[in-house]
Image (tube, rainbow, N blue to C red):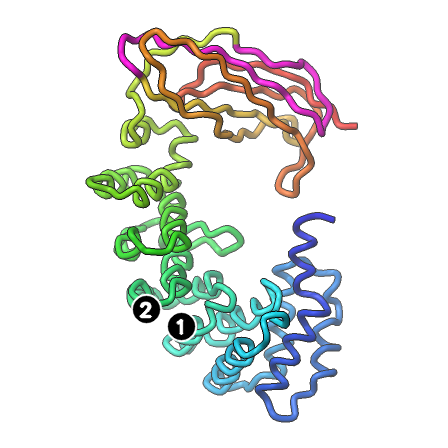
Amino acid sequence: MSEQKLMKDQLADQAITQISQALAACLTDFPQQAFIRQALDGLEELELKQRVNHIIVVLAAYLPVDFIQAAEVLIAVKQYWLGLPSVDKWGDFTAWPFIDYVAVYGINEPRLALDVLKILTPVFSAEFAVRAFIELHFDISHQQLMLWTTDADPHIRRLASEGSRSRLPWGKRLSQVCNNPDPIFPILEKLKDDTSLYVRRSVANSLNDIAKDHPEKVINLCQSWSVNASIERQWLIRHALRTLVKSGHQDVFVLLGYSKNPQIIVSQFSLTDTRIVLGDFIGIEVLVKSASLDTQKIVIDYKIHHIKANGLTTTKVFKWKNISLLSQQAMTLNKRHLFKLITTRRYYPGRHTVEILINGVSYGSADFELQIV
């Protein structure tokens, strides 16, 4: 059973029953069985996000049409959920339709809707729902995001950074943030030294998103943050710059303390096999030697050129090792890379290439054939 199917199954029979029980506890004479039948109708054929949207439509048929009244029910639902014994708590995705309902039916009441999202986000993150308000009511939303950065609840502080990410996975891209991230920087500035790793990781991910469109702005910000930076902030900076490291942006390596234009000799680069079957490992071996009289700090990664259905290739960079080489020191490195079936990539047979990168610069490549049996 795939990971995606496992996730979507969290919005199935049990979740619908739990949602109906919550509504029955918060609404007088709620027709529980009718709700369950309508919510389950056609649900099994849908993927995860489609299930969320389907349940939202069903919720709209049973919640008050007036969003002010519906908001009161949603808040009551949270209180009902908090009162449940821990053994009866809902699955991770069960509350998602309640959250995204706010983005659909509360879009014309942004101030009230944002307050509701703030209340509900500890139950299930409102990072997807809040994006609709950022897109259509930017000034009102930005004001709220700034206020949330000082909230006592880390879930709410994280909502400020995660909800405003320009390229949030599974979320709609925020084109205005992609074009101009400047209004988001004050939010991240407020949260960069947050006491919660949960929040700091979100800040780093937001910067990593922005770096895909505005690398220089992110580098400049991280340079300013690196002055007298704590260990926690140093980690945040490294995590924020990870895509720029993989893409070989040279200014990033110096910022992270690695050698500028390292003098390295690469020899004996080889693969253990010239042909493998999907499910096997490919072994990578490389000998690196310092050609400098000084100690050099370097980042060694490898890039795999995967064959696509049309015969062209797509590339992905994988982390390998960060090392320090003393003057004239040589070091042999070995790595095994597993080619296995995963939900996020489809493999195709043919010639694949492994490329060695040192501080983002290519130092050689080798080919092998991948067979699908």
Residue 199 at x, y percent in the picture: 38, 55
Q: Is residue 6 above or below residue 149?
A: above
Image quadrant in which the C terminus is located: top right
Instruction: Find the magenta span and give its range.
Output: 269-295
Contact between labelled residues 2 and 1, with CB atoms less than 8 Å apart: yes
Residue 322 at x, y percent in the picture: 41, 25
Residue at image position (69%, 75%) is 17
Residue assigned mark 1: 114
Badge 2 crowding class, 10 Å Cα cut-off, few under 14, some 14 to 19, many 20 or more, is some
Residue at image position (58%, 83%) is 63
Residue toward you, 70 or 153:
153
Badge 1 crowding class, 10 Å Cα cut-off, few under 14, some 14 to 19, many 20 or more, is many
- Residue 144's tag is 2
Residue 292 picture quarter: top left
Given the image, on which type of amino acid does mark 2 rest? Gln
Residue 257 at x, y percent in the picture: 29, 28
Q: How many marks?
A: 2
Q: Is residue 358 above or below residue 45?
A: above
Residue at image position (61%, 69%) is 90
Q: Is residue 309 above or below residue 1?
A: above
Residue 233 picture quarter: top left
Residue most extreme to the bottom: 29
Secondary structure of the residue carrying numbered label 2: helix
Q: Is residue 182 left or right of residue 274?
A: left
Give the mark nearer the N terminus: 1 vs 2: 1
